[in-house]
Amino acid sequence: MNKRDEFLKSQKVLRLATFGKNKTLHIAPVWYRYSGKKIYIGTNTKTQKAKNTRKNNHVAFCVDVGINAPDIYGVMGQGNANLILENNKVKTIAKKILLRYFKTLENKSAKELLDDTDCIIEIIPEKFSVWNY
């Protein structure tokens, strides 16, 4: 596995940019899961990022760390996103995402987040940029 993929699999927060009304940008920090080919984000269909993705599937994202060289590294990219709405698929993927952040899904917050998740934003990256200093 290359350094970029290892980095994306190890980090915890991705900033997702979607297009809103009148091509305004909406940027949201999100929890995610990177499979090595796709990025998955659990959310609710009522969120702005889900609404925007439904109307315009072009998205951008950024994951980065560090403020002092030589420990600055980041990955940003662009791609197309799809909304996964099928309940069984949504819950299966959402559980995998949440287990990156919680030791167990029995945690009260994990349960609430899982209950609130009714869609998955699936990103198929088409372009990556990597930087380090």
Image (tube, rainbow, N blue to C red):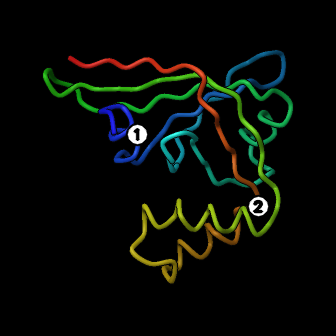
Residue in the picture at 32% in, 17% down: 131
State how far apart marks 2 and 1 are (Cα).
24 Å
Dot 2, crowdedness within 10 Å: few (<14), some or many (≥20)? many
Relative side of 66 to 45, left or right = left
- Looking at the image, is 66 positioned above or below residue 41? above
For label 2, the residue is: 118
Upstream in sequence: badge 2 or badge 1: 1
**Which secondary structure lies at badge 1?**
helix
Q: Quadrant of residue 42?
A: bottom right
Q: Residues within 10 Å of mark 1 (few under 14, many from 20)?
A: many
Residue 115 at x, y percent in the picture: 69, 72
x%, y% of residue 10? 34, 47
In which quadrant of the rendered image does the N terminus lie? top left
Mark on residue 33?
none
Amino acid beneath label 2: Asp
Q: In the current view of this chain or complex, which residue is farthest to the bottom?
A: 106
Quadrant (top left/top right/bottom left/bottom right) for the C terminus: top left
Q: Which residue is depicted at the point 76% across and 69% down? A: 88
Tag count: 2
At 68% from the left and 53% from the top, the residue drawn is 43
105 relative to 91 in the view: left or right: left
The residue depicted at 51 percent of the width and 83 percent of the height is: 106
- 126 sits to left or right of 80: left
Amino acid type of the residue that numbered disc 1 sits on in the rendered structure: Leu
Query: Farthest residue in the front direction?
Result: 1
Tell us which disc is closer to us: 2 or 1: 1
Above/below status of 17 relative to 50: above
Q: Nearer the viewer, residue 7 or 37?
A: 37
Q: Quadrant of residue 27?
A: top right
Give the number of the disc on residue 8: 1
Q: Is residue 123 above or below residue 87?
A: above
In x, y percent, where is residue 117?
70, 62
